[in-house]
Amino acid sequence: MPRVDSALRLSLHPLLDRRAVVNGAWWPYSHDAAAELPDLIAAVDQRLQRTTMLVGVHRNAWRRIPQRIPARGRTVRVGWFRHADPHVIVLFFTSDEPVTLLMIPPDTAAGPAEAALKLTARNTADLSDDAIFALAHLPPDPALRATAESMACCESETRSSTSRPSAPV
């Protein structure tokens, strides 16, 4: 059954669909990646019974992006997208496919943000992230959209990889 975690403001579809553009949504409280990512990593790890090893974020969507985040006895690397949809965050695991979340901007009004969370908790395989934003009545963010390009590249301090590899190296 789909679940929306109101406290963390996270939704994940229980059956991750490789055809889906996003597997859920996340509505962080701020643009501070150092403050927001630890709770997201913990919740996704617990809910999916996986171990997050790398998080890819869009560089322009965050004010502070650390290179590493402490998480339950390990360190999770943080990479950043230069050319991708700024409303997407990707979590890579030790095994399995990565999870792609639609990131709802922190300053979004509660009604549209909650609608997007509920929508992504259902099957969104046939919807683009733009379609999800439109259906949830989320206003476009022209500053972030202007930086988006069709090819996704995740850069970390040591390597570049294309979007959605099977696991980080």
Image (spheres, helix red, strand yellow):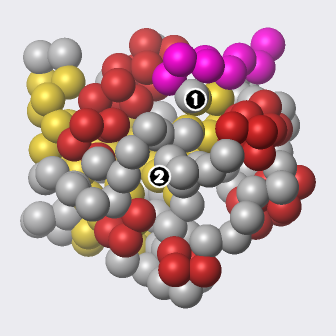
Q: Residue at x 71, y 17 (%)?
A: 3
Q: Residues within 10 Å of mark 2 (few under 14, many from 20)?
A: many
Task: Between label 2 and label 1, give the one nearer the viewer.
Answer: 1
Q: Give the mark nearer the N terminus: 2 vs 1.
A: 1
Q: Is residue 169 left or right of residue 18?
A: left
For the residue pair 87 and 17, the one nearer the viewer reads as 87
Residue position for label 1: 10
Q: Which residues are magenta?
A: 1-8
- Distance from label 2 to label 1 (Cα)? 12 Å
Residue position for label 2: 89
Can residue 125 be seen by looking at this rendering? no
Q: Position of residue 15 (x, y in %)?
A: 72, 26
Give above or below for 91 relative to 78: above
> Is 6 included in the stretch rendered in magenta?
yes
Task: Write down the quadrant of residue 51 in the picture.
Answer: top left
Q: Residue at x 35, y 25 (%)?
A: 39
Q: Of helix, strand and loop, which one carries label 1?
A: strand
For the residue pair 70 and 30, the one nearer the viewer reads as 30
Q: Of helix, strand and loop, which one carries label 2?
A: strand
Can residue 67 be seen by looking at this rendering? yes
Q: Residues within 10 Å of mark 1 (few under 14, many from 20)?
A: many
Main SS of residues in magenta: loop
For the residue pair 93 and 124, the one nearer the viewer reads as 124
Q: Is residue 51 left or right of residue 142?
A: left
Residue type beneath disc 1: Leu
